[in-house]
Amino acid sequence: MPQQTEPRMPRGRPREFDTDAAIERAMGVFWSCGYHGTSLPDLLEATKLSRGSLYAAFGDKHGLFLCTLDRYIDDALARLDTELDPRKDTLAGLRTCLAGYVDRTSGIAGKRGCLVVATAMELAAHDTEVEQRIRRFFKGMEARLAKALARAQAAGQLADGVEPATAARLLLCLVEGMRVVGKTGTDRTLSQAVVQTLIDRFAK
């Protein structure tokens, strides 16, 4: 008769929390308070995690912060991909994109600001891992805008003399500058007028 063996138990203890939800909650704290202004107790309270669970899942506060920054950047670039979908009219997509920035830089949303911009100001100069992520975001955004403008140029939608790469850098500087100015409670109507003026200069 064959010898019976005990059933093998899975190694390690399974996580009993939603990692994605924890990252989202932590993002809210970092976004509101900044990296240095956020304490470990703040994160434990927001995520509902024990100290041991947080360390096991993310390593430490810095590791958790990098996860939140990655999530924020991935979401922002995914939104841009949707707005600039090559199957849609390019200039209409650019208008949608810029209208979104007007919304995000007005009122309460504007005063909250942008996690990427705030992080760039606070950490990028002396944190290599953060700096790499900020660069990835800006390069990714600029590349997407340049490709969209190149499609518009190929379709005969751009005004003469508008060079896609230069125009993409200009748009990048505009929208990220709007995120900074929006912290002061900028006028929505004025932001809309600026965006409309720029698109009118680009389009035929």
Image (cartoon, rainbow, N blue to C red):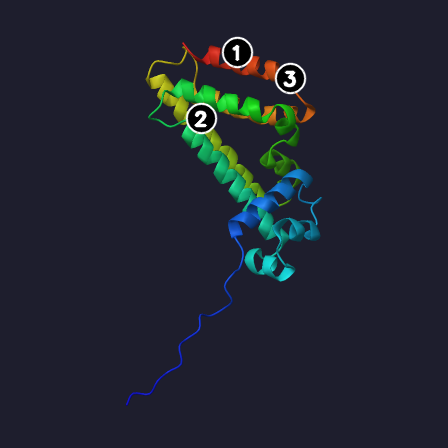
Label 3 packing within 10 angstroms: few (<14), some (14-19), many (20+): some
The crowd level at tag 1 (other Cα within 10 Å; few <14, some 14-19, many 20+) is: few
Give the residue type that dot 1 points to: Thr
Residue annotated with mark 1: 197
On the image, which quarter does residue 181 sit in? top right
How crowded is the residue under tag 2: few (<14 C-alpha within 10 Å), some, or many (20+)?
Answer: many
The quarter of the image holding the C terminus is top left
Q: Which amino acid type is marked by label 3? A: Asp
Question: Front-most of 97 and 5?
Answer: 5
Q: Secondary structure at mark 2?
A: helix
Residue designated by label 3: 187
* Mark linked to residue 182: none
Q: Earlier in the sequence, mark 1 or mark 3?
A: 3
Q: Of helix, strand and loop, which one carries label 1? A: helix
In the picture, the disc for residue 145 is: 2
Residue type highlighted by circle 2: Leu
| Residue in the image at 50% along x and 24% along y | 169
Quadrant in the picture for the N terminus: bottom left
Return the disc, 2 or 1, that comes first in the chain's sequence: 2
Q: Is 20 rendered above or below residue 92?
A: below
Foreground residue among 4 and 44:
4
Residue sitting at 39 percent across and 21 percent down?
90
Quick one: 6 or 113, which is closer to the camera? 6
Closer mark to the observer between disc 3 and disc 2: 3
